[in-house]
Image (cartoon, rainbow, N blue to C red):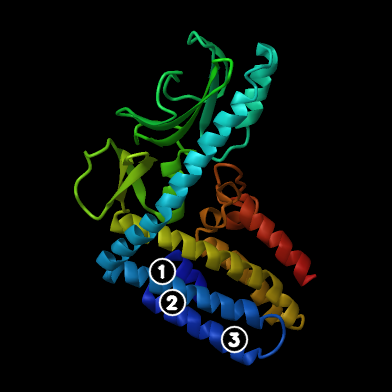
Amino acid sequence: MAAGEWIRVPSRAAAIAAIALLLLTAAVRRRGWILPPLLATALLIGQAEWRLTRLTAAWPAEREARIEAASSRLSNELRAARTLADSLARLTLGAAAASREAGFTAVENVVRGVPLESGVAIFEPNGDARVWGGRFRLLPSPVGDSLEVRLTPYYAVLEVRRHSASGRVAVASVLLAADPAVKDQERTLASRFREKTEVGLLILAPHTAPNTTDVFDYEQPMPGGTRVLFSVQFVPPEQAEAVGRAARVGKGRVAWLLLASLLLAPWLVPAGVVRLLLGLLPLGLAFRAPLGPLLGLPAMFDPRVFSSSFLGPVSQAAGPLVLLGVVLVMLG
């Protein structure tokens, strides 16, 4: 239950108590499969509490570490986005000779399943759109450089153009970023980058970004040197946001491991009062800690989805009822 209290409200005192009790239990039960989950739970609690303490007491260093990690990763992410756009344009160009009906099917297949939001189109030599597929945030145009970045107050789009021998032009666009006010931007490069690194990306026009170490210039090789296509300013999270994310991740991992251990632990003790009390611990954990959001199953523990007064608190949501059923089956 001490681990459950740490899940409910993380603190150093709760972490020390939980780790001590877990290690004590592991020392008493020095054999069997229960040792690995107990030791792993203690390790996860200690690691999560250490991360929370670092984020609280040494935020400037943690902030700089996030920026450095993001900086080393960004060039690969941008290279992958450019490679994706280039491959989409080449594949789309392969459908330029097909009929319009077959072309629409072909280009839809080209963009299906790609990791970033993308759109492709084929234009006639006179500039008329022939076929298109995917999603465009900005109206594509056959006129422009082979590699181009279009910036508006709301969108940053990477475009690649390829030309066929017949004069038709294939355009592929990949959405790099969108303004926070724009909905449905989960598949932008910036959103996915933030999920991986906790660092946001602010894409700016060339030579307009501040002269700081938080800025990355994306350059295109040219015959006479390089050309800056755009600049990226790193936007690290606020301290409270970083602490909240670390707490959610840590509590979620501990909750899964602890719940699995508690559900299987009754098999280690003989039938009787001790097994009964041990079997009721998962229910106590469900009542004390917000298991639904932590386990990624919010609906299971949401009384607005299911609720009944038949068994009192146990039937106020589906999650506790499921746990009760599992416990009763295991207690036999």
Decide: few, some or many residues near mark 3? Use Cα within 10 Å; few <14, some 14-19, many ≥20.
Answer: some
Amino acid type for the residue under numbered disc 1: Pro
Q: Nearer the viewer, residue 81 or 304?
A: 81
Q: Quadrant of the C terminus?
A: bottom right
Picture quadrant where residue 131 is located? top right
Tag 3 secondary structure: helix
Viewer-proximal residue, 164 or 218?
164
Q: Residues within 10 Å of mark 1 (few under 14, many from 20)?
A: some
- The amino acid type of the residue labelled 3 equals Thr
Q: Which residue shows up at 39% across the image and 54% down it?
A: 198
Q: Is residue 222 above or below residue 301?
A: above
The residue to which callout 2 is attached is 15
Q: Are marks 3 and 2 in contact (CB under 8 Å)?
A: no
C-alpha distance separating marks 3 and 1: 21 Å
Distance from disc 3 to disc 2, alpha carbons, whole Å, reads 15 Å
The residue that disc 1 covers is 10
**Who is closer to the viewer here, 15 or 166?**
166
Question: Is the residue under label 1 in contact with that under label 2 (CB below 8 Å)?
Answer: yes
> SS class of the residue under badge 1?
loop
- Amino acid at the residue labelled 2: Ala
Q: Residue 49: percent from the left, percent from the top?
A: 41, 73
Residue 186, image x and y in percent?
48, 39
Q: Is residue 192 above or below residue 322?
A: above
Name the N-terminal-most of marks 3 and 1: 1
Measured Cα–Cα span from mark 2 to mark 1: 7 Å
Q: Residue at x 65, y 72 (%)?
A: 261
Q: Is label 2 in a helix, a strand or a loop?
A: helix
Q: Which residue is mark 3?
A: 25
